[in-house]
Image (spheres, rainbow, N blue to C red):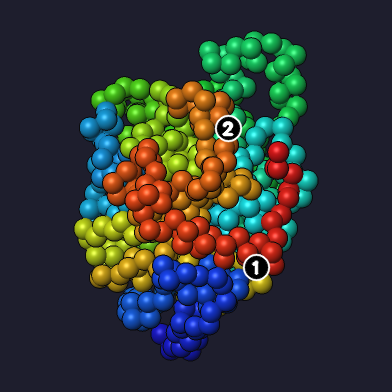
Amino acid sequence: MNKIKPLLFFTVFAFFVANCAQKSFAQSTPLSKATAINDHQQPFIIRAEQDKEALEKLTALQKKTGKKPNIIWFVVDDMGFGDPGCFGGGAAIGAATPYIDKLAKEGMKLTSTYSQPTCTPTRSALLTGRLPCRTGLTRPILAGDVLTQNPWSDEISLPKILSEAGYKTVLSGKWHIGEQEGMRPSEIGFDEWLGWYAAEKEISQSFDKRRYPDLVLDTFKLNAYNKLDAGRDLMFGKKGEKITVQKVTTSTDDMAEADQTIKAYSLRKIKEYAKSGQPFFLGHTFMKVHADNFASKAFEGKSDSKYPYKDGIVEVDAIIGEIVAELEKQGLLENTFIFITSDNGPQEDSWPDAGYTPFRGGKATAWEGGVRVPGIAYWKGMINPGRESAELFDLMDLFNTSLIIAGVPEKIPADRYIDGIDQTSFLITSNGLSKRDRVHIWVEKKFMAIRMFEYKMHFQYTNSVADMMNIDYSSTGQVGLAPWLFNLYIDPKERMPVGHRMNAWTAVIAAEVKGHLATFKKYQMKNIGLDK
Ligand code: CA
């Protein structure tokens, strides 16, 4: 315990430096609640009292356990805001989610959680605390993409920092943030990983002859596709060691069982670290429920709906329940911060193999349906049961929050722009409020919209030529004379702009964006070959 004292003192000091220094840098309007403490960090609402309370709570826990807290993220692929029962879906739409619902009930439900519009951008933002337009990881990496620059060569990943802080860091499941040499999980900071490089469909399209007959049944095309090296096999890697093929993936049956495979790995690692006593960060990134979904043997027909997507939701829910039960069995639950979310909105293009959102649009759009995702924070004894908040939370905030929870606030990089905000006190204090007063929404390198209060202002918009065809049959449009301003409280589906005719803030919110865009002058966007 004595060894912990100087560490705690330093942590307290660095924490206050990171959170409480006040100096104004960026442009802001009277509507802004946030303060810029420097020129390389997203301005945030200063909440010194709740930060102090949070730190006291973390300090007390560390004194009690003598260990740093574990961190687990469950990232479901393409799950809709409206899929979990606790977010309005569940049994009502044919796929009950009792385990997720229980964690929401016994933890905190965040109803204004924002992701990036697609997979690769969200996953990179989570691990760097930075907008994808800054890192260059602006859109999903697809079979055949060759990156011109390693985006990770000058990025600092969360697992790298946590490893240096004494954590074991594990990625279990989907990667999708670069599969070329130097870009893989064990090469950018994770101690160990088991999973697939690509999204589900990128893998199954090479053997699913029912859906892709023009590819699978044509020898020439299939050979050509296989030369793209789409990263379809189950891979295993350890830091400093050669990454190897753990199992060749050859069939839709293999993909059906993918999440059972990575579940077993996560359970094994949890048991191992429970025994060794090392703190760990586990990114459990599901392969499901990204299209195309194939029900696993144990879950086929288990949803009331019977559709493979819905069976996938039931399976994902059961896996979360099983992993949380193992944490409890191992006595780790009170020292583990858990966050459950989805990496983007539902991929409506693949309907009916798609999730549900009550909002407009879906994956790939800047509409709420693309970027508003379920968010559940659970920490037994640390997050009061039954909490719910509609205040803003950006998934990038998990970067900063994890570093605060790990007790290394001084490791939040200061030599680059960080868009994430520490939200520890929002989550773990009894009446914590969000420190974020806005969310910036980008699609690739196009600044699309800003959310502030209940307002959402679009400067560009996604236009789906056919209903639900947000990716394969859409365009990006420019707004006219005035930006499109929606009031999400009276119009959550963004159907009717309130505009300047019934809202006072059109010019003010538009002006708020200038400070954000100005950050790109000093901190320039990277191009790694994903630009169109
Ligand atoms: Ca996704």
Residue 288 seen from this side:
no
Displayed quadrant of residue 220: top right
Instruction: Give the CA separation, mark 2 to mark 1.
Output: 32 Å
Give the quadrant of the N terminus. bottom left
Asked whether residue 347 appears in the rendered view, the answer is yes
Amino acid at pointer 1: Arg
- Residue 257 spot, x, y in % from top left: 46, 31
Residues at discs 2 and 1 in contact (Cβ within 8 Å):
no
Residue behind mark 1: 416
Give the residue number, with chain letter if any, for mark 2.
475
Q: Residue furthest right?
A: 148
Q: Give the farthest residue toward the front.
A: 501
Decide which of 255, 440 is in the foreground and name it.
440
Local SS, label 2: strand
**Label 1 residue SS:** loop
| Amino acid type, label 2 | Ser
* Label 1 neighbour load within 10 Å: few <14, some 14-19, many 20+: some
Of the residues tagged 2 and 1, which is closer to the observer? 2
**x and y, in percent, of residue 378 in the image:** 32, 58
Q: Nearer the viewer, residue 96 or 515?
A: 515
Classify 418 as above or below 338.
below
Q: Residue at x 24, y 65 (%)?
A: 384
Figure quadrant of the C terminus: top right
The residue under the point 24% across, 49% down is 102
In the rendered image, residue 133, in percent from the top left (x then y), is placed at 63, 52
